[in-house]
Amino acid sequence: MPLSVSPQAATHVGRKRKRNEDSHLADPDLGLYIVADGMGGQAAGDVASRRAVDVARAYVADRVDVLTRFAEHPSQENRVAAQELVAAAIQAACADLWAMAENDPKLRGMGTTMVLFAVAGDRGVVGHVGDSRAYLLRQGVANRLTEDHTIVAASIKNGTMTKEQAKVSALRSVLTRAVGTQESVQVDTLLVEIMPGDLFLICSDGLYGYIEDEEVPALCAGVPENLAEALVDVANERGGRDNITALVLSFHGATAEEPEPEALTKHEALRGIPLFMHLTYREQAEILAISDVRSHPIGAAIVTEGEPGEDLYVILRGRVAVEKDNVAITSIMTGGYFGEMGLVDDSRRSATVRALEPVRTMVITRTDMMNVMRREPVLAVKLLWSFVQGLSQRLRTVNTELSEARAELFEAQGVTPYTS
């Protein structure tokens, strides 16, 4: 039985504003959910958010077969097409708002934030511009899936401002990207795997401005039928200085009590690799989005000594042997990995890796990794730093082993090594 979703939505003008410039959409038939927070003064904020939601919905509705294909066949090609669809829907809204403002001086400067969540089977595609947010709550932990496009968020990311300074900065609501303020906009997209029991929260800044990320799991515990309204009430009780919108998506299915484990295993496996362990959940999700899962029968050579290779393999299930010159030298269990040098080096494989039992691996290619690193420079710096640390540790280990071997050799020969 496929996953089903129970959506909830609530919006409120807040305690300080006279007009609600937030808009939202919950369309289970289309599998589309949107929150938009308009801006621009006069009536333009209302116009921007509502129009953007309508245009994005129409764009996806005309091309929903892209999501259907991805749900039925989650190949890399269909994944890319689904992410491109979500980005294009937001771009269509952006171009439409820009054209409206060009034709009507009263609408000049209007724009909106947007979080668009499209469901394709057991996967979701998030598209994001501005400072509205999307969270994933899984097993009692809240993971933010979006990064705010604001001056203070950029300052925190590049290390010129602390989170404490950001909370009181006069620039905290100044956007670096918005839908409609220019003819086109850069859209962030992210692919997430959905499991039974997952809860997604999509909201405007009028909600999360009063709720710390750490509070989200407790506030959402139990998923009551009026959760969206309850969250809005919390924001109002704590000040309600802005419009408030909460869209809650609760996923469930026939396997809710025994969730299919592989999506969780992939995240756990990735966190166990030193190269990726310091990434945020969102950054790890970007790496998972470019990964491919493969099956290998008993005895199959997953990589072969002497052959070229540019893939990193993470063992999700099973056990493999590492062979050098046809001699088994070690084995690697579930959670282990091999081939990481292929991500940065063109050299040939130094050993053969063979399945000792039916094996499932998660595979990340160098080409896909480089594309992510070009798109996300901060993530690239984290990966390169982790890689350098790993090489440094290996060098220290090798130096220690060589020193011990040298001492043993001198001892065996009865020679006292020279020291200065």
Image: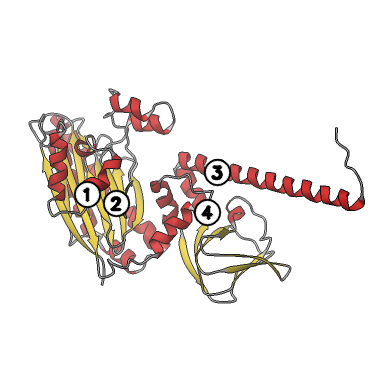
Q: Quadrant of residue 65?
A: bottom left
Give the crowd class for mark 4: few <14, some 14-19, many >=20 residues within 10 Å: some
Q: Which residue is mark 2?
A: 137
Secondary element at image label 2: strand
Q: Which residue is mark 3?
A: 386
Q: Are marks 2 and 3 in contact (CB under 8 Å)?
A: no
Q: CA distance from mark 4 to mark 3?
A: 19 Å
Q: Nearer the viewer, residue 157 or 126?
A: 157
Asked whether residue 385 is in view, the answer is yes
Q: Residue 220 — which label?
A: 1
Circle 1: residue type = Cys
Q: Which residue is mark 4?
A: 367
Circle 2: residue type = Leu
Q: Nearer the viewer, residue 88 or 378?
A: 378
Q: CA distance from mark 2 to mark 3?
A: 27 Å
Q: Nearer the viewer, residue 309 or 50?
A: 309
Q: CA distance from mark 2 to mark 4?
A: 31 Å
Give the crowd class for mark 3: few <14, some 14-19, many >=20 residues within 10 Å: some
Q: What x and y, as percent, mark residue 195?
A: 31, 61
- Locate residue 200 relative to residue 158 in the image: left or right: left
For the C terminus, the image quarter is: top right
